[in-house]
């Protein structure tokens, strides 16, 4: 089973419980539950395909402002991580000692990291695709 199927099954489980309460015939209840799960998975798949089509059109656009927004956000996140996790911890104490009134500032990584994780494939979904052998490379 895929992650989407597991997720949809978990979300539709309460509906399946209601179906079994109102329909006495177990075979009919199982059939209805299957149809509900299949419909939910199909709709989620169609939404993903529509988003992929939009992403593909954006990537082929000749304007850098349309096709380059993902790389730009990725570079901004990478630069912010460089500043927050390397430069400030390493250079911050020296700057604060030798430039007494200067106080090193910190970036709001609680806002930045979810954006970066989304660009990297929502945490582990990209790795899951590679394990299953459905990735392009």
Image (tube, rainbow, N blue to C red):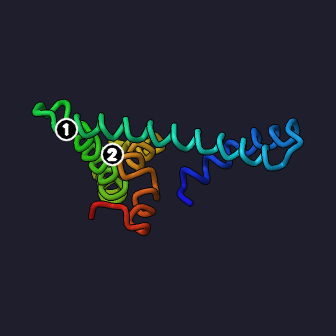
Residue at 19 percent across and 36 percent down: it is 67
User: What element does badge 2 sit on?
Assistant: loop
In the picture of the structure, the residue carrying the numbered disc 2 is: 100
Considering the image in quadrants, where does the C terminus appear?
Answer: bottom left
Considering the image in quadrants, where does the N terminus appear?
Answer: bottom right
In the picture of the structure, the residue carrying the numbered disc 1 is: 68
**Place of residue 61 in the rendered image (x, y in percent of width and height, measured from the top left):** 15, 33
Task: State the residue lying farthest toward the left.
Answer: 62
Residue at 37 percent across and 56 percent down: it is 85
User: What element does badge 1 sit on?
Assistant: loop
Nearer to the camera, 61 or 87 = 61
**Place of residue 34 in the rendered image (x, y in percent of width and height, measured from the top left):** 67, 47
Mark 1 or mark 2, which is nearer to you?
1
Residue at 42 percent across and 41 percent down: it is 48
**Place of residue 108 in the rendered image (x, y in percent of width and height, measured from the top left):** 43, 41
Q: Quadrant of residue 115?
A: top left
User: Does residue 55 appear left or right of residue 131 in this picture?
Assistant: left
Nearer to the camera, 129 or 45 = 45
Nearer to the camera, 77 or 57 = 57
């Amino acid at each position: 089973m895929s992650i989407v199927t597991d997720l949809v099954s978990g979300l539709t489980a309460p509906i399946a419980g209601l179906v079994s309460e109102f329909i006495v015939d177990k075979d009919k209840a199982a059939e209805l539950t299957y149809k509900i799960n299949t419909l939910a998975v199909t709709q989620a798949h169609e939404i993903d395909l529509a988003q992929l089509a939009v992403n593909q059109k954006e990537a082929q656009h000749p304007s850098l402002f349309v096709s380059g927004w993902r790389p730009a956000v990725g570079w901004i996140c990478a630069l912010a991580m460089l500043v927050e996790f390397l430069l400030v911890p390493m250079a911050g104490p020296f700057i604060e000692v030798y430039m007494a009134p200067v106080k090193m500032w910190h970036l709001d990584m609680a806002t930045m990291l979810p954006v970066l994780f989304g660009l990297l494939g929502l945490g582990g979904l990209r790795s899951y695709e590679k394990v299953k052998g459905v990735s392009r490379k």
